[in-house]
Amino acid sequence: MRKQIGFAISALGRKHQVILKGFGAYEVTRLIQMVEIIKTRLGMLHQLNKVIVKSVKSSDGESERQITGCQVILSKG
């Protein structure tokens, strides 16, 4: 998680915004933790959250299931 936080912070230094995504319960939890750490370190960031549903086909190709995720857009004020 340390590398992703460093990457996001450096990307915000070069760009106006960064988009972070996570799918599944574990990844969404980690995503929210990362966003809070980034906001604490940098401060003065705008945050936009979206809930995403992605369809994934099974390995046999017959059935399809949906995975819920989260997308967070962090941008400079």
Image (spheres, rainbow, N blue to C red):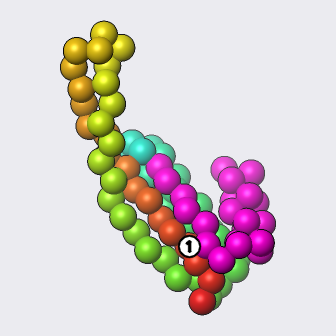
* In the displayed structure image, the side of residue 73 where residue 25 appears, left or right: left
SS state under label 1: strand
Q: Position of residue 2 (x, y in %)?
A: 72, 53
Outermost residue on the top side: it is: 60
**Label 1, residues with CA under 10 Å away: few <14, some 14-19, many ≥20:** many
- In reply to whether residue 13 is colored magenta, the answer given is yes
Seen at 33% across and 42% down, the residue is 54
Q: In the figure, 64 relative to 66: above or below?
A: above
**Quarter of the figure that contains the C terminus:** bottom right
Q: Position of residue 58 (x, y in %)?
A: 31, 19
- In reply to whether residue 16 is colored magenta, the answer given is yes
Outermost residue on the left side: it is: 63
Look at the image and tell me whether residue 49 can be seen. Answer: yes
What's the amino acid at mark 1? Answer: Leu
Seen at 30% across and 48% down, the residue is 53
Q: In the figure, 22 relative to 50: above or below?
A: above
13 or 37: nearer the viewer: 13
* In the displayed structure image, the side of residue 34 where residue 6 appears, left or right: right
* In the displayed structure image, the side of residue 49 where residue 3 appears, left or right: right
Q: Position of residue 15 (x, y in %)?
A: 71, 72
Seen at 74% across and 51% down, the residue is 3
Rendering quarter of residue 38: bottom right
Q: How many marks?
A: 1
Seen at 30% across and 10% down, the residue is 60
Q: In the figure, 33 relative to 26: above or below?
A: below
The residue wearing badge 1 is 74
Span shown in magenta = 1-22
Q: Position of residue 67 (x, y in %)?
A: 31, 40
